[in-house]
Image (cartoon, rainbow, N blue to C red):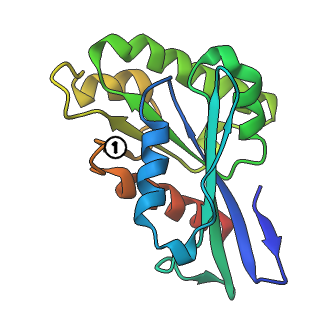
């Protein structure tokens, strides 16, 4: 749920990057962080334990305009990739305004993508959220690798509701901002 800061005239929105381990969630966030103007972003925070890591930072995009005189500040989060860390994944989803599912396009990762997508639906349902009612986009990452599934196959398994989806190569930035802009626009539209 968006939080309004009347003092700074900002609407704070939470976007969570979700997906299987080593799929590119952290790479997406690090790429965004390194490309947005330092004057518009907060610190990149990494909460790491021995076995898991969560990244987050906030930024204030200058090109998305205002909503009734309020600027929109986005707080971007990653979840730990492994379903084993479900308690952390679930906690990070609390109060979410938009979700980006980062799928690993490699053929051998299809089952991990499907498992993580089911886990996303289950965790949101525990908070009373329906993913079909939340701004949601999918990024098919690692499209530069030789052993990737066709996008049509990934769509069939991961995108039955036909939400916006983008091909990406997070290591080089391909599709990273297209994905972010798409979910940000959906979040802003949901606020209006």
Judged left or right of residue 185, residue 188 is: right
Does the image show residue 138?
yes
Residue 60 in the image: state x and y as whole percent: 58, 73
x%, y% of residue 99?
58, 44
Q: Which percent across, then down, holds residue 67?
A: 65, 80
The answer to whether residue 182 is visible is no
Q: Nearer the viewer, residue 100 or 125?
A: 100
Q: Is residue 186 left or right of residue 158?
A: right
Against 119, residue 12 (above or below) is below
Residue for point 50% across, 55% down: 183
Secondary structure beneath dot 1 equals loop
Taking the view exactly as shown, the residue that stands out farthest to the bottom is 69
Rendered position, 108 above or below 59: above
x and y, in percent, of residue 132 in the image: 60, 40
Q: Quadrant of residue 66?
A: bottom right
On screen, residue 145 versus residue 20, left or right, reads left
User: Which quadrant does the C terminus fall into?
Assistant: bottom right
Q: Label 1, on which residue?
A: 170
Q: Residue at x 31, y 50 (%)?
A: 175
Quadrant into which the N terminus falls = bottom right
Residue at image x 69%, y 23%? 122
């Amino acid at each position: 749920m968006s939080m309004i800061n009347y003092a700074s005239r900002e609407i704070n929105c939470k976007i969570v990057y979700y997906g299987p381990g080593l799929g590119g969630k952290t790479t997406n966030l690090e790429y965004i962080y390194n490309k947005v103007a330092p004057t518009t972003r907060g610190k990149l925070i990494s909460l790491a334990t021995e076995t898991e890591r969560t990244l987050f930072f906030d930024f204030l995009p200058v090109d998305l305009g205002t909503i009734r005189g309020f600027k929109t500040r986005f707080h971007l989060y990653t979840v730990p990739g492994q379903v084993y860390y479900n308690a952390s994944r679930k906690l990070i989803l609390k109060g979410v305004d938009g979700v980006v599912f980062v799928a690993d396009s490699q053929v051998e990762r299809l089952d991990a993508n499907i498992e993580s997508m089911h886990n996303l639906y289950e965790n949101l349902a525990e908070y009373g959220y329906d993913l079909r009612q939340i701004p949601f986009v999918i990024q098919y990452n690692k499209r530069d690798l030789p052993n990737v599934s066709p996008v049509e196959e990934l769509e069939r398994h991961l995108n039955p509701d036909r939400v916006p989806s983008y091909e990406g190569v997070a290591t080089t930035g391909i599709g990273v901002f297209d994905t972010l802009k798409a979910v940000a626009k959906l979040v802003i539209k949901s606020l209006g």
